[in-house]
Image (spheres, rainbow, N blue to C red):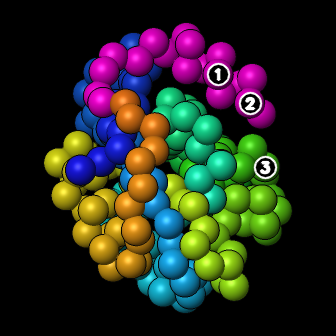
Amino acid sequence: MLAFCLPIPLHSNESGRKEWVVGGLSGLLQHAVVEDVVRVLNQSPLPAAQLVQARAVPFPLYACAAAFHARTAFENHSSVAQTLSMEWLLWLARDRQVERALEKIGVHAHSNNQRVALLGMGSKMEVERVLPEMAVRLNMKMVKGPRETQRAVDWNALEALALHRL
């Protein structure tokens, strides 16, 4: 079961666009093997997935705000990164350099029992199915994290939050 699942809001002029959600799980990563983490994330059928230090996601709405801005930048061809997942990482880290973003919030190779957040972006059905499977493949030990179920999100509040965090 996901710790949270929130819709990514759409601009009013995007009525034909498919609604996506952001879902997340919180857990302990026993032994981080960076190659394994990268492989699991790259094999994900989700449009974007990230495994970051839990402190990078202070509350679920923050992950949603970062996802919204990453998706918007990627679709408008104004993104810094070449993939949606990497653009999302940059927004989560509040940085425009991939190396600095990875240093700030990435999972580090030789740390045991890191508290991490596994995040996914896509359709509600995909996110609810794929994230728990990914957690098992990463050998994550689940712990309780912020709990927030799908609900309406106020776009103005979300935009203000994301811009305040940058």
- For the record, the magenta segment spans 149-166
- Local crowd at mark 3 within 10 Å, few (<14), some, or many (≥20)? some
| Residue lying at 65% horizontally and 49% vertically, measured from the top left | 55
| Residue lying at 35% horizontally and 68% vertically, measured from the top left | 135
Amino acid type of the residue that numbered disc 3 sits on in the rendered structure: Asp
Q: Which residue is mark 2?
A: 165
Locate the C terminus and report the quarter of the image it occupies: top right
Determine which quarter of the picture holds residue 105: bottom right
Left or right, 112 with respect to 121, comes to right
- Across and down, in percent, residue 9 comes to 40, 25
Mark 3 or mark 1: name the one nearer the start of the chain: 3
**How many marks on residues?**
3
- Across and down, in percent, residue 61 comes to 50, 30
Left or right, 148 with respect to 145, comes to left
- Local crowd at mark 1 within 10 Å, few (<14), some, or many (≥20)? some
Q: Which residue is mark 3?
A: 95
**SS for callout 2:** helix
- Across and down, in percent, residue 42 comes to 43, 76
Predominant secondary structure, magenta span = helix
Left or right, 160 with respect to 43, comes to right
- Across and down, in percent, residue 88 comes to 57, 51
Question: Cβ–Cβ below 8 Å for labels 1 and 2?
Answer: yes
**SS for callout 3:** loop
Q: Which residue is mark 1?
A: 161
Amino acid type of the residue that numbered disc 2 sits on in the rendered structure: Arg
**SS for callout 1:** helix
